[in-house]
């Protein structure tokens, strides 16, 4: 499971012109799923994101989590995060799970993140053509991969 976490001043996602998820200060999380992912991957990723200290404290040091700043969470499924660009110029998405596996995993991730953070997770619509808007704060962008925990 891969995630791109972006600290946001505001973020939203629209499907067919309708807003499906919106936050003010918080985290926009793009989530990619592969067939090798398990509940263990979901648990690890949700716990790490909930506790990720990338918000400034009173001294301007990134030392607070989204929970501490009472921020929002917006999770958007994105199969292209699983792209392989090893050969040629056209990315391969062979590692990306199909919807019948990926959607329940994305839903479980959102539920687990809500439980870990006690923050309602705003969402896009799985598999839809989504328009994501972001005012990246910092910019602060973190990439996490449960198969390469660093």
Image: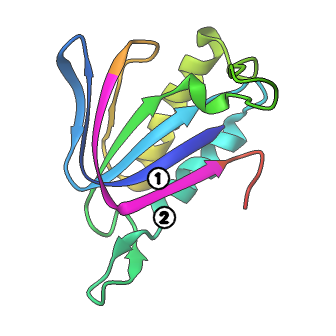
Residue 29 appears left or right of 120:
right
The circle drawn on residue 133 is none
The residue under label 2 is: 51
As drawn, is 95 to the left or to the right of 110? right
Disc 1 and disc 2: Cα gap in Å?
Answer: 9 Å
Q: Residue at x 62, y 46 (%)?
A: 43
Query: What residue would you read off at disc 1?
Result: 116
The vertical placement of 132 against 138, above or below, is: above
Q: Do the residues labelled 1 and 2 touch (CB within 8 Å)?
A: yes
The N terminus sits in image quarter: top right
Q: Is the magenta stretch mostly helix, strand or loop?
A: strand
Q: In which quarter of the image is the C terminus?
A: bottom right
| 87 in relation to 62, above or below | above
Q: Is residue 21 magenta?
A: no
By what rule are the colours in the image chosen?
A: rainbow
* Label 2 element class: helix
Q: Position of residue 32 (x, y in %)?
A: 59, 31
Q: Against 40, is 66 above or below?
A: below
Q: Give the range drawn in magenta.
A: 131-144
Q: 13 or 117: which is nearer to us? A: 13
Please state if 60 lies on the left or on the right of 113 as rendered: left
Q: How many numbered marks appear?
A: 2
Q: Residue at x 71, y 26 (%)?
A: 34
Label 1 crowding class (10 Å Cα cut-off): few <14, some 14-19, many 20+?
some
Give the SS element for disc 1: helix
Q: Where is residue 31 in the image (x, y as percent from the top left)?
A: 53, 35
Closest to the observer: 12 or 138? 138
Q: Earlier in the sequence, mark 1 or mark 2?
A: 2
Quarter of the image for residue 15 reads top left
**Where's residue 18, x and y in %?**
17, 17
Q: Where is residue 139 in the image (x, y as percent from the top left)?
A: 37, 60
């Amino acid at each position: 499971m891969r995630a791109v976490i972006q600290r946001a001043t505001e973020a939203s996602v629209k499907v067919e012109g309708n807003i499906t998820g919106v936050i003010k200060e918080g985290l926009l999380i793009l989530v990619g799923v592969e067939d090798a992912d398990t509940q263990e991957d979901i648990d690890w990723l949700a716990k790490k994101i909930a506790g990720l200290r990338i918000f400034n404290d009173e001294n301007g040091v990134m030392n607070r989590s989204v929970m501490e700043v009472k921020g929002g969470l917006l999770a958007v499924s994105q199969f292209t995060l699983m792209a392989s660009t090893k050969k040629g110029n056209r990315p391969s998405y062979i590692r990306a799970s199909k919807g019948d596996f990926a959607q329940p995993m994305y839903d479980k991730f959102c539920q687990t993140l809500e439980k870990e953070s006690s923050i309602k997770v705003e969402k896009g619509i799985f598999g839809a053509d989504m328009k994501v808007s972001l005012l990246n704060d910092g910019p602060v962008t973190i990439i996490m991969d449960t198969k390469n925990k660093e």
